[in-house]
Amino acid sequence: MAVAIAAAALWAPSAGLAQTTASPAAATAKAVFAGGCFWCVESDFDKVPGVLSTTSGYTGGRTANPSYEQVSSHSTGHAEAVEVLFDPAKVSYQQLVEYYWRTIDPTTKDQQFCDRGSPYRTAIFAQNAEQLRIATASRAALDKSKPFKEPVVTDVVMGGAFYPAEEYHQDYYKKNPLRYKYYRTSCGRDARLQQLWGDKAAH
């Protein structure tokens, strides 16, 4: 696993960008990322120092309180996403965004690895104007410095309502470690991340 290497490399923020989206007195802040299967996104962000909790859920769609069956039918417009609660005194929003890029394939639209369709699209759902500014600037910087030829197609948008997924989806990688490992490996997630990012891949 390249988690330690990736974390060390990614904690160095890009020049010129704000380091936090919360005031010094704020104890917690939220970020929302869509990166394909939310089991994997949750697992990846739980490894980050300063992340307090992660919640799998649905956002970016038209239907209130959608079920997994509705979302996976591609009829509601939602993406599988993860709400990240973090301590901005220990990790900044910018650092989370930089880490996020190396947990996904930002070159595929409406698909992540073996999962296809709009529920598996990649997107950053900013929670305020400052997060939107930081994420937009980070995407622009990535498009210039990326180690791959394909364009970055990940959306950066203002977030809306976030609906927690069913309980059996929460911490799936902890509850069902063998099934989770089999899914992640057979889906080709880590192999593709290594191909895209090399030693900077976060997995």
Image (tube, grey):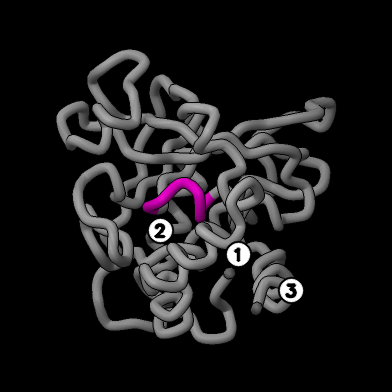
Rendering coords of residue 62 (x, y %): 23, 20
Q: Are marks 3 and 1 in contact (CB under 8 Å)?
A: no
Count the labels in the image: 3
Residue annotated with mark 3: 4
For the C terminus, which image quadrant? bottom right
Element class at badge 1? loop
Q: Nearer the viewer, residue 34 or 179?
A: 179
Looking at the picture, tell me which residue is in the foreground, 59 or 136.
59
Q: Is residue 126 above or below residue 70?
A: below
Where is residue 202 drawn, in percent x and y? Answer: 58, 70
Residue holding disc 1: 14
Query: Viewed as shown, does residue 46 lie left or right of 80?
Result: right
Left or right of 153: which side holds 29?
right
Q: Residue at x 32, y 38 (%)?
A: 79
- Amino acid tagged 1: Ser
- Disc 3 and disc 2: Cα gap in Å? 23 Å
Occupied quadrant, residue 73 = top left
The residue singled out by tag 2 in the image is 139
